[in-house]
């Protein structure tokens, strides 16, 4: 009993001490740090990078910058005490902007403010806008751009609707340093198109308007397509899959209708189609095999399309002309491909444009250079061609 009472008293004493220790407020000794000093400014497109000397304070946790990009809209940016610089972004112009810097303690106590001014260089929305080049293309307008700093931007395309009101025709998202895209679905008559650039801070450029007459195009009639078996081509289908006619059977989203060549077919490999009519090809839509098969396995990764009006019956390439070289990438640009990439690949398909200036051809040859899975067989859900 004496031993029990001794341990019980000891336990209560321990818990009492622990409770007393826990009752001490956290950061009781925390004090506001001193100010940052020796601030230097490097102006960049749409922003500025600030370097500074940190205060000598054990309680310092981070440096806080507060700045306004427009009236009534203040942004903040933090940089840990491991760093000695902070980059501010989102400024809509090259005017002088006030920035306030604070050193902040672990207890969230701010130092006295340090105020500076920055003069950002030309923001990406403005420089990209100035680079825009609108040109007619098959069925619509092609928009080319330069984005030298790789900013995340949205390029918005406007055109009048049936009532004559301007409406959004397409929004193109990109961070590429350059590129172009097309907006299609319009008749070959003059039409006004407008384009402006927007960034993730809701900064807008002006809008450029231009009257464009789209080139005439239409979808080629797949009922006229015929398979051509040339020596050296690969058309033998894998067990359980259809032959190459499945590529133009119109069943874009039917898994069982995919064309898949037999394993061991070798690489590169090609198959040939008689389009039934001589055409200047403008673009094509590539539908992947469904159920997560895009960007893996036998999905073509790099491929070419060749054209001819008089293919050699020995299967040689002497009478063939290269119409375009293409790479099959997931829309998100990430690997492994996302679920949204898989859905888009199988149900919407991927559009590819042929370079303008090609001659008209009746026969095409689809040549796969390699596959995403590095295998020696391919699979394709559907191919749809457009042209004049």
Image (cartoon, rainbow, N blue to C red):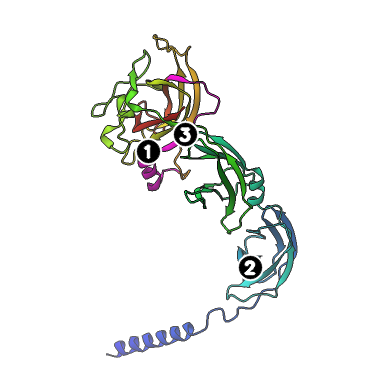
Precedes in sequence: disc 3 or disc 2: 2
Q: Which contiguous range is marked in magenta? A: 335-362
Residue 315 sits above or below residue 379 on the image? above
Most foreground residue, 176 or 95: 95
Q: Which residue is mark 2?
A: 64
Residue 211, position as x, y percentages in the image: 59, 41
Residue 104 in the figure: left or right of residue 19: right
Q: Is residue 98 above or below residue 357?
A: below
Q: Could you say whether the residue bearing mark 1 is in a helix, strand or loop?
A: loop
Point out the residue furthest to the front here: 163
Sequence-first tag of 3 and 1 = 1
Residue appearing at x 38%, y 86% in the figure: 10
Number of residues whose C-alpha sits closer than 10 Å to that of mark 3, classed few (under 14), some (14–19) or many (20 or more): some
- Give the residue furthest to the left: 240
N-terminal-most mark, 2 or 1: 2
Other residues around mark 2 within 10 Å, as few (<14) / some (14–19) / many (≥20): some
State which quadrant residue 51 falls in. bottom right
Label 3 sits on a secondary structure element that is: strand
Are the residues flagged by discs 2 and 1 in contact, CB closer than 8 Å? no
Q: Is residue 66 left or right of residue 6?
A: right
Q: Is residue 268 visible?
A: no
User: Which residue is found at the position 48% from the left and 39% from the top?
Assistant: 186
Secondary element under disc 2, as helix, strand or loop, is: strand
Residue at numbered disc 3: 352
Does residue 196 appear in the picture of this structure?
Answer: yes
- The answer to which of 176 and 116 lies nearer the viewer is 176
* Percent position of residue 194, x then y: 58, 47
Is 367 one of the magenta-colored residues?
A: no
Q: CA distance from mark 2 to mark 1?
A: 45 Å
Numbered-mark total: 3
* Residue at (70, 60) in percent of width and height: 50
């Amino acid at each position: 009993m004496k031993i029990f009472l001794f341990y019980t008293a000891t336990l209560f004493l321990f818990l009492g001490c622990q409770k007393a220790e826990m009752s001490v407020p956290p950061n009781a000794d925390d004090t506001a740090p001193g100010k940052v000093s020796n601030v230097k400014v490097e102006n960049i497109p749409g922003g500025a990078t600030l370097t500074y000397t940190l205060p000598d304070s054990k309680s310092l946790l981070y440096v806080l910058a507060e700045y306004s990009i427009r009236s009534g809209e203040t942004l903040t940016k933090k940089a840990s005490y491991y760093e000695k610089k902070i980059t501010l972004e989102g400024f809509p112009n090259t005017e002088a902007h006030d920035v306030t810097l604070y050193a902040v303690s672990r207890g969230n106590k701010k130092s006295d403010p340090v105020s500076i001014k920055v003069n950002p260089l030309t923001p990406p929305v403005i420089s990209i806008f100035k680079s825009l080049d609108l040109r007619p293309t098959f069925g619509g307008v092609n928009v080319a751009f330069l984005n030298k700093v790789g900013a995340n931007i949205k390029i918005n395309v406007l055109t009048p609707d049936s009532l004559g009101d301007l409406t959004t025709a397409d929004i193109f998202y990109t961070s590429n340093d350059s590129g172009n895209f097309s907006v299609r679905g319009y008749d070959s008559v003059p039409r006004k198109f407008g384009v402006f650039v927007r960034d993730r801070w809701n900064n807008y450029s002006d809008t450029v308007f231009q009257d464009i007459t789209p080139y005439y195009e239409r979808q080629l009639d797949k009922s006229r397509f015929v398979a051509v078996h040339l020596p050296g081509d690969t058309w033998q289908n894998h067990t359980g899959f259809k032959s190459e006619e499945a590529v133009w059977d119109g069943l874009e989203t039917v898994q069982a209708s995919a064309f898949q060549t037999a394993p061991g077919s070798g690489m590169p490999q090609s198959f040939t189609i008689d389009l039934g009519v001589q055409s200047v090809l403008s673009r094509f839509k590539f539908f992947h095999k469904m159920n997560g098969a895009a960007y893996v396995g036998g999905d073509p990764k790099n491929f070419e399309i060749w054209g001819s009006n008089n293919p050699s019956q020995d299967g040689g390439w002497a009478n063939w002309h290269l119409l375009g070289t293409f790479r099959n990438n997931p829309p998100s640009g990430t690997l492994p491909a996302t679920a949204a990439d898989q859905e888009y690949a199988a149900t919407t398909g991927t559009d590819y444009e042929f370079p303008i200036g090609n001659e008209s051809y009746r026969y095409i040859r689809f040549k796969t250079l390699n596959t995403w899975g590095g295998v020696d067989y391919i699979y394709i859900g559907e191919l749809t061609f457009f042209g004049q």
